[in-house]
Image: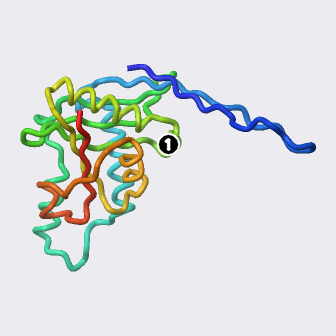
Amino acid sequence: MRLVVQRETRGSRRRPGQAPPVRGWSIVITIERLAWEDPRGVALRATMDEEMHERYGAGHLDEDPAVTAERDRVLTVDPATVITSLLAVDEDGTPLGHIAVRWLGDEVELKRLIVLAAARGKGAATALLSEGEQVAREAGAARVILQTGDKQPEAVALYRKTGWQQIDVYEPYAATMPWSYCFAKAL
C-alpha cells in the first residue's frame, strides 16, 4: 500500500506586515507486510517497550507479583498467532511505525501500534490502522478489536477519530488490566 499524505496551508490571506504562511508539506508513506521477526519491526517494538515503561513503570509496588507476571504474559504476543506485521516507511525506506495483526481466539486483534515520535501527526498511524483493517477483512473477520492503556490518551483519541467504537474490556486484559480501553471496528 502506498499513500501520499499532504497538508495544505489554509487561509492564505495576510494582513499588511504579516509573514507569508508556511507552505504545506507532503510525505509518501508505504505500508509493507512483513514477518513478526523482521529486524525493523523488532526495533520499533523495542522502542515501544521503552516508551510504555516510561509511562507505566514496572508495576505497582503493592501489587501481587503473580498479577504482574500474568500481565506480562498477556502482553507478550505469541508469534504463532500473528497473521502479519505491518511497517510504515517513508520515501527513503526509513521505518516510521509498526502494527501487528493477530488472531486472539476467533477474533482478529491489532497489537503493538507504534509510530516514532518524530513521525507522529503525519498519517502513519492512520495508514497502519487502515491496512490492519484490510488484513483482518482478508482473514475473514467481521470486526477487528484492539486494546490500549489508560496512560495513552493519544491512542484513545486516534481510535475515536478513526471510527473505532469503545467496547467492554475483553479477555485476556479484563483480569490484569481492567483500566484498559478496548475498541472494535466493524469491517
Residue linked to disc 1: 120
Q: How many marks?
A: 1
**Left or right: 22 as drawn, with respect to 138:** right
Residue 38: x %, y % from top left: 28, 29
**Left or right: 55 as drawn, with respect to 94:** left
Residue 54: x %, y % from top left: 39, 61
The residue at 24%/27% (across/down) is 135
The secondary structure type at the circle numbered 1 is: loop
Q: Residue furthest top?
A: 2
**Where does the C terminus fall, quadrant-wise?**
top left
**Left or right: 24 as drawn, with respect to 162:** right
> Label 1 sits on what residue type?
Arg
Up-down relation of residue 119 to residue 67 (above or below): above
Residue 117: x %, y % from top left: 49, 46
Asked where in the image residue 97 lies, by quadrant, the reply is top left
Up-down relation of residue 84 to residue 157 (above or below): above
Up-down relation of residue 148 to residue 128 (above or below): below
Coloration of the structure image: rainbow
**Where does the N terminus fall, quadrant-wise?**
top left
